[in-house]
Image (spheres, rainbow, N blue to C red):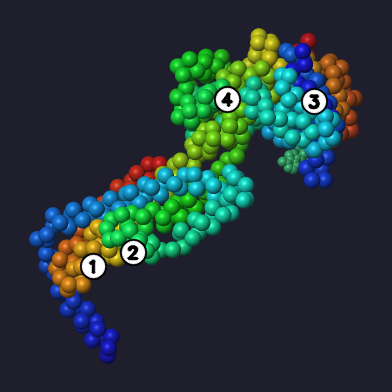
Amino acid sequence: MSVISVTKLNKHFNENHALKDISLEVQQGEMVALLGPSGSGKSTLLRHLNGLVCADKSQAGLSQVKVLGNRVQQDGRFSPQVRASRGQTGYIFQQFNLVNRLSVLDNVLIGALNATPLWRSLTGRFSLNQKRQALAALDRVGLADFAQQRVSNLSGGQQQRVAIARALMQQAKIILADEPIASLDPESSRIVMEILQGINQQEGIAVVVTLHQVDYARRYCPRIVALKQGEIFFDGASEQLDQVTLDALYGSKPQAPHSVPQLWAKTA
Amino acid sequence: MKIVNDAGNMLELGADFFPPDFTDIRYYLEEMLITLHIALWGTLFAIILSVPLGLMCAENMVPAWIYQPTRRLMDAARAINEMVFAMLFVVTVGLGPFAGVMALFIHTTGVLAKLFSEAVEAIDPGQVEGVRATGANKLEEIVYGVIPQVLPLWISFSLYRFESNVRSATVVGMVGAGGIGVILWESIRGFMFPQTCAVMLIIIVTVSLLDFGSQRIRKHFI
Ligand SMILES: Nc1ncnc2c1ncn2[C@@H]1O[C@H](COP(=O)(O)OP(=O)(O)OP(=O)(O)O)[C@@H](O)[C@H]1O
Ligand SMILES: [Mg+2]
């Protein structure tokens, strides 16, 4: 079953054609890396999938984004179901985007807002069951002891794990992660990628993750989609992405030896 | 020469104030309490109304057709001094503390809505987007993404406004809007300088105590 389905998506920022006729399918249970040089449109594409940005207007029925069978946007208009769709989609940001002055637990509970009646959510009356779920989500990412801490006291790697716990709280069916490890040290990066991989393999939740390091993509993601200047430049199994394609993707200059770490050896 | 003469008069006048006459202290204190009430209720109503109005003045929260008219309305409420509002309300609702509360309420709403909206315009949009991305609606975005970011500033502004409203409340009393200002004005007009001095001392002590207390609370929040 196709959990993400993008048809003929175009996006202009003024004169800048950031996404060009993008069509993409992601199946249930896949873990996909989205690669591409800076400015190639990776973040823009992910933001379209969650209905955070609206595509260009188009002819009726021409372009659309569907997630989990629900329409997110069509022909440059948000569908009425866009919030319901966001509710089922976990979104991880490079800068974490947690609410700094709230506790870790409250940040995880934000993941329950979509499924909570308005009078409860606005007065902060989450049920005992929801609080248990939130603690379980924190336990899953190894942060159960931090529930009452303020988010701003946590390290970057820990904050990113809180963001993942928030997605778990949403009971998300897919996870979109926009450079989740770009501001983390190698050890935290490994932990975060392994948590995402664990969620993908145990729950069968599809994960789309944009990455800058090719070695991480090869190591954790069986499928790689590469964007170049707003177009899909490569889409296939990660073993098929060879050095020639990579050089063409990131510009013709050959990669310096030190940028090809041994991690590659472990991909099998 | 005139100035020297006037200065001499001033000294004589100053001497007339001492010693202060505290015979009616109970009455003074009761009226001081009414003044505090005027300041408290005027500020409190203003805070409650400034929360929605402050959000409606912020350009990162609402479209221009909402924030432009709301801002102009708040500009007007702020531009007109409390004293002017007090005189207007004394004429329309009559002498007494209610006129004072209304005067402070309207002017303070104009001030606080502006300060609140400036705090809202300075928030980190990423934190709000994080809430939006979970499927939260607009109200939930505000409660969970915006308010936590601005709350410390909002509290600090509100306390600061309360301090200055205690001072203003004594003045609006002088045009008949209730509280200790009424006694102050009557004793000045009746040339009862020792009583005037007592009332002024009570005002000075009360305002200083409140300023001190409120400053300490404000420090705690920033
Ligand atoms: N809100 C915006 N307003 C104007 N232009 C934008 C906006 N967001 C993205 N762009 C433009 O769209 C293009 C694609 O940007 P995008 O952020 O999607 O790239 P990216 O692949 O995520 O890059 P990076 O690896 O640096 O994050 C860029 O040319 C960028 O300048
Ligand atoms: Mg990006």
Marks 3/2: CA distance? 67 Å
What's under tag 3, amino acid-wise?
A: Val
Image quarter hosting the C terminus of chain A: top right
**Chain of the residue that carries numbered disc 4 in the rendered image:** A
Q: Looking at the image, which residue is at 83% across and 36% down?
A: A58
Q: Which residue is mark 3?
A: A6
Marks 4/3: CA distance? 24 Å
The answer to whether marks 3 and 2 mark residues whose Cβ atoms lie closer than 8 Å is no
Q: Which residue is mark 4?
A: A114
Give neighbour class at mark 3: few <14, some 14-19, many 20+ (Cα, 10 Å): many
Observer-side mark, 1 or 2, equals 2
Q: Looking at the picture, tell me which residue is in the foreground, B117 or A164.
A: B117
Marks 1/2: CA distance? 18 Å
**Chain of the residue that carries numbered disc 1 in the rendered image:** B
Measuring from the top left, give residue B22's x and y in whole percent: 11, 61
Give neighbour class at mark 4: few <14, some 14-19, many 20+ (Cα, 10 Å): many
Q: Which residue is mark 2?
A: B91
Left or right for A165, reference B34: right
Q: Quadrant of residue B152?
A: top left
